[in-house]
Amino acid sequence: MHPRRFARMRPSGKVSNAAKIIVDPKTPPIDCTIVDYSAGGACLQVIYGTTLPMRFDLLHGGTKKRCRIVWKERQRIGVTF
């Protein structure tokens, strides 16, 4: 395993862990939960069986970030920004 470039943090306090995945502006957003995040990426939890493209936008706390999936394990997905 490679060392992380950025320290991961769990959302706490006033920061919500709820987020939305935007695959296409014409389709409804997909709800997800942020397990942890850093300046360079995040671990997301989605509903089992959710199919996502390799790239999508993540909307969290009024910020939209372009993401790329780097790993998947059951309901969790690791993304880089």
Image: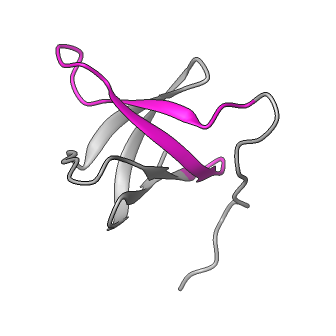
Q: Is residue 16 left or right of residue 77?
A: right
Splitting the image into 4 quarters, where does residue 29 fall?
top left
Image coordinates for residue 80, horizontal then vertical, percent: 47, 52
Splitting the image into 4 quarters, where does residue 25 fall?
top left
Q: In the figure, 64 relative to 49: above or below?
A: above
| Rendered residue at 43%/53% (across/down) | 79
Of 17 and 3, which appears nearest the observer? 17
| Rendered residue at 37%/62% (across/down) | 70
From this viewpoint, which residue is outermost toward the bottom? 1
From this viewpoint, which residue is outermost toward the top? 26
Image coordinates for residue 12, horizontal then vertical, percent: 77, 41
Splitting the image into 4 quarters, where does residue 53 fall?
top left
Image coordinates for residue 21, horizontal then vertical, percent: 36, 32
Q: Check the image and tell me how it is coloured.
A: one colour
Image coordinates for residue 66, horizontal then vertical, percent: 41, 35
Is 31 part of what is drawn in magenta? Answer: yes
Q: In the figure, 8 relative to 59: above or below?
A: below
| Rendered residue at 54%/51% (across/down) | 42
Of 14 and 23, which appears nearest the observer? 14
Q: Is residue 65 left or right of residue 9?
A: left
Is 46 part of what is drawn in magenta? Answer: no
Query: What stretch of residues is rendered in magenta?
Result: 15-41
Q: Is residue 67 left or right of residue 27?
A: right
